[in-house]
Image (tube, grey):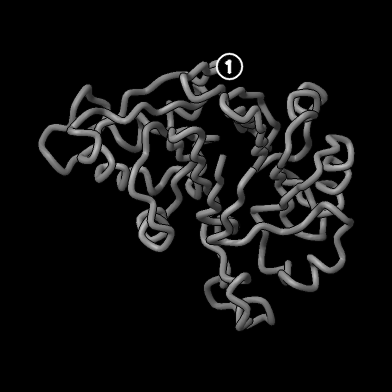
Amino acid sequence: MEVVFLGTGTSHGVPMIACDCAVCTSSDPRNKRTRPSIHVVMDGLHVQVDAGPEFRLQCISNRITWIDLFILTHGHADHVCGMDDLRRFCDLLGGAAMPVYSTEDGLGHILAAYPYAILDRPVVKGYAAFQLKEMPGKLELPQGTIESTLLPHGGVNTLGLVFTERSSGRRFAYYTDCKRVPREAVELARTANVVVLDGLRPEPHPTHMSISEAISAAHEIGAPLTYLTHTTHAVDYQPTCDSLPKGITLAHDGLRVTV
């Protein structure tokens, strides 16, 4: 299983508009963060999770050339606003609608933002079409399974996802945009080989885990390797990595991980 981190930043991205702090002006490319999304390849199945405003550019820079299905973790702008660019992948699927999974709330956001795309097939070549499906607790696929759990994120719930590749048995958990990891989510991720957690910034936040809260969650889950994502310009990549416990590090845009 391969995971590509297309984006690892927050809703404002890094560098942030009208900011000349040390991170926003850093020459370290790992401090340049677009809005958060990942691309998972599991036994040849290409799964895209979320599509922020830079989604098109992320696909080009990371050479994403195929998507079989799309999962929206939740309907916030930094995760949903790039979905129109799935139109190109509908073309590549031969003009078929893209299967799109989310929570009931997430599907409502898609319907409100993209009413023209809720079709069995694109209106014409080059247009998007979405086949909306509520994400089940366990999505069974020939290439493996994708399990889901709900994570609290302010007034909404985010989908936490655990991928299990059929051929290798390797497991990968993606828990972005959450204030805490509930007990059932901890248990679901317990045997994951790699875990990704929301780790917004050093200071507490009302709807995201701080870095110290993410570290505590990582220790509770106990995976061999944990990446923190969705980080703000308060997080300088290398000094922060140097300060993290063994087995925990920061993700960065363009990172490719073989699970």
Above/below status of 117 relative to 214: above
Above/below status of 211 relative to 76: below
Name which residue lies at 67% across and 80% down: 21
**Which residue is under mark 1?**
138
Location of residue 221 (image quadrant) = top right
Residue 13 picture location, percent across and down: 55, 63
Residue 62 picture location, percent across and down: 43, 58
Name which residue lies at 38% across and 48% down: 82
Q: Is residue 238 left or right of residue 134?
A: right
Name which residue lies at 73% across and 38% down: 193
Q: Is residue 157 visible?
A: no
- Three-letter code for the amino acid on which mark 1 is drawn: Lys
Q: Mark 1: which secondary structure?
A: strand
Q: Residues within 10 Å of mark 1 (few under 14, many from 20)?
A: some
Residue 247 picture location, percent across and down: 83, 52
Seen from the viewer's position, the closer of residues 219 and 24 is 219
